[in-house]
Image (tube, rainbow, N blue to C red):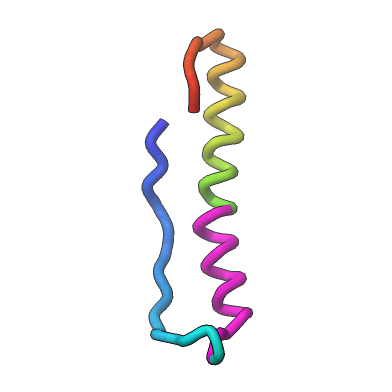
Amino acid sequence: MFDNCGIVSNTVQTVLELDFAAFDRLFTINVGGMAACLKHAARAMVELNVIGNI
């Protein structure tokens, strides 16, 4: 499995200016999307008796 997707922030912010709504969206898409892909890839590997690692 190769997981290469995500979004980037369209603003430059310091920690003092951090917009948590935008950060939550970015984190949910990037990390949540990767976790969903891994979940389904692992399930397929188990069902197909694939020996390997993710």
Q: Position of residue 39 (x, y in %)?
A: 60, 35
Residue 32 is situated, as x and y percent measured from the top left of the image, at 59, 53
Q: Quadrant of residue 25?
A: bottom right
Location of residue 23 in the rendering, given as x and y in whole percent from the top left corner:
56, 74
- Who is closer to the viewer here, 17 or 2? 17
Q: Does residue 7 appear to the left or right of 46 in the view shown? A: left
Residue 20: within the magenta?
A: yes
Decide: is 7 above or below 39: below
Check if residue 36 falls in the magenta segment.
no
Magenta stretch, main secondary structure class:
helix
- Against 38, residue 34 (above or below) is below
How many numbered circles are shown?
0
Q: Quadrant of the N terminus?
A: top left
Which residue, as the protein is rendered here, is positioned at the far bottom?
17
| Residue range of the region highlighted in magenta in the rendering | 17-31
In the rendered image, which quarter is residue 38 located in?
top right
Give the residue displayed 40% in from the left and 69% down from the top.
Answer: 8
Where in the figure is residue 49, as x and y percent of width and height? 55, 8
Q: Residue at x 53, y 29 (%)?
A: 41
